[in-house]
Image (spheres, rainbow, N blue to C red):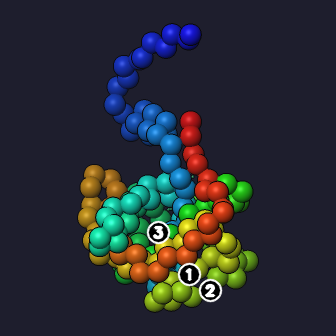
Amino acid sequence: MTCVTPTTLDVTPSVLRGQLARWPTGVAVVTTLGPDGPVGKTVNSFHATSLEPALVGWCIDHRSSQLDAWLAAEGYVVHVVAADQTDLVTRFAASSSDRFAGLDWAPGLDGMPLLPVDVPLRLECRVTHRFAVGDHTYLIGEVVALTAAAHAVPLTLQR
Ligand SMILES: Cc1cc2nc3c(=O)[nH]c(=O)nc-3n(C[C@H](O)[C@H](O)[C@H](O)COP(=O)(O)O)c2cc1C
């Protein structure tokens, strides 16, 4: 049996980021409609919040170039990414000015952008709570519509 000796590390932002990556998560692309058109980004802070009422959430880094659009957003769409959709993860994490280029998105609830791909789970949400905590802001939303592809396998990030 391998003997693993734990190491105590200083709690710095980079250590925390690196070590928290050892907590396995799924990955989602969240989208909303900003004043200048569709906005979207890759996130792994997406989480379940409450079943009754039906609430989910994710948090946005205050350094995001999209911060103003997200703080003003009244709703968003969560697209849970499938194991074979890593291209979506890359596209919506890249520092491209138009992450929607070439994507024929459709308007969903309140005109919010639905990506033209089948994902394991898609949630259309209206924002109910926003609160800043440290260097992120939580965006909690009520799930108003849910579309699931039962057999699609979600992508998991694990270090
Ligand atoms: C796997 C993964 C998970 C991420 N999770 C988040 C997140 O939860 N919140 C966030 O604000 N940014 C997250 N990001 C970063 C954004 O996707 C984006 O790359 C970054 O915010 C810079 O783009 P922006 O300035 O347009 O926001 C994540 C990136 C990756 C690759």
Residue visible at 64% across and 57% down in the picture: 153
Q: Is residue 15 above or below residue 2?
A: below
Work out whether residue 36 can be spotted: no
The amino acid marked with disc number 1 is Pro
Q: Earlier in the sequence, mark 2 or mark 1?
A: 2
Which residue is denoted by mark 2 in the rendering? 106
Residue visible at 35% across and 72% down in the picture: 54
Q: Secondary structure at mark 1?
A: strand
Q: Secondary structure at mark 3?
A: loop
Q: Is residue 32 above or below residue 41?
A: below
Which residue is denoted by mark 3 in the rendering? 66
Which residue is denoted by mark 1 in the rendering? 113
Q: Name the side, left or right, on which 125 lies relative to 102.
A: left
* Residue labelled 3 has its Cβ within 8 Å of some atom of ligand 1: yes
Check the image and name the residue furthest to the front.
150
Q: Secondary structure at mark 2?
A: strand
Tell whether label 3 touches label 2 (CB within 8 Å).
Answer: no
The amino acid marked with disc number 2 is Ala
Q: Is residue 6 above or below residue 150?
A: above
